[in-house]
Image: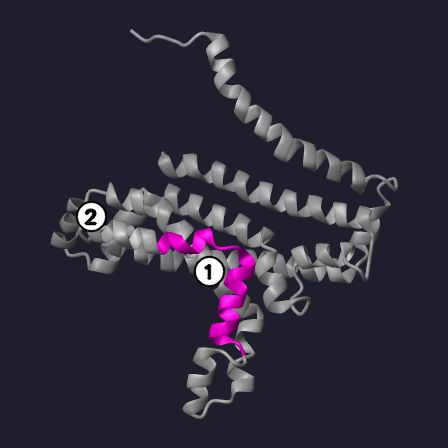
Amino acid sequence: MSTRAPKTALTAFAAPGVLVLGLFFIAPVTAVLIGAFSDGGAAFGRLAADPVFWNGLRGTLLLGTVAPLFSLTIGFCVALTLARVAPGVRTAALIAISLPLTFSGLIVAYGFILLLGRAGFVTLLLAELGFDPAVTGAFIFSPIGLGLAYSYYLVPRVVLIVLPAISNFDRSQLAAARSLGAGAFRAVIEVMLPQILPSLVAAFCLTAAVAVGAYGTALALVGTQVNILPLVLYSKISETGTDLPAASAASLVLVAICACIVALGEAIRPAGKR
């Protein structure tokens, strides 16, 4: 026999969430939507005719795909290792892994500059081995270096999402596959991955949405040298330009991309569970 809470109690519990959703999502998006159409929708036309916008969109989609895939691979390997260690060691490792999530994007960017920049610690060590600091120090300011900096705080998100699924996985299935002649790698690919696929999809979608909308790290590391949508948006509202309707239109494009990523994840996850 099941009991249901009264509607008044359910409404009271739901009210804080609805209030937060309205104040911090619906209201800002509505304001941006109004700003984008403040000139009759001409901002979208200017945005569509701007090659910088299309290059930024291309760069955003590329960075928002490659960096999450790299982070998903590293995070899965880390989670697979942590699932096999003692609980105390796992807890300590998770605390250390979660630390990057407490840092802002600017702190992460300056940390990589101090480590891998032209006068960074690693760059100076490599210079002692004969490497040119002008070449090795420029790596972190490239699109690949930006993706590496993104992975610094994307990998912990992957680990925190995927680890519970791996920990609850019945490892006797791997042993059974090995006894039937499958190698260790094949057993993981064909037995484990299909069962934890929903968690992997959720981790990829979350990290992709974070990478697409990341702003502070990109601005501190590459400025406007790498063309991605958050920096295109920054250029629309910086001192060199004040096209607020176009900035609002670019913001809506970013929101739409993130919404599509999350919707894709929700559409794939039920199929994985079935």
Q: Amino acid at mark 1?
A: Ser
> What residue sits 35% from the left and 8% below the top?
3
Check disc 2 and report the residue beneath it: 87
**For residue 201, what is the image quadrant?**
top left
> What residue sits 27% from the left and 46% below the top?
166
Q: How is the image coloured?
A: one colour
> What residue sits 58% from the left and 72% below the top?
142
Image spot of residue 179 (x, y percent): 11, 53
Does 228 appear above or below 245? below
Q: Main secondary structure of the magenta part?
A: helix
Q: Circle 2 sits in a helix, a strand or a loop, which is it?
A: helix
User: Which quadrant would the N terminus be assigned to in this image?
Assistant: top left
Closer to us: mark 1 or mark 2? Answer: 2
Q: Circle 1 sits in a helix, a strand or a loop, which is it?
A: helix
Foreground of the two, 137 or 1: 137
Q: Which residues are magenta?
A: 97-117
**For residue 29, what is the image quadrant?**
top right
Q: Is residue 43 magenta?
A: no
Does 266 appear above or below 121? above
Residue 151: numbered disc: 1
Image spot of residue 5 (x, y percent): 41, 10
Does 15 appear above or below 49? above
Image spot of residue 152 (x, y percent): 45, 60
Q: Amino acid at mark 2?
A: Pro
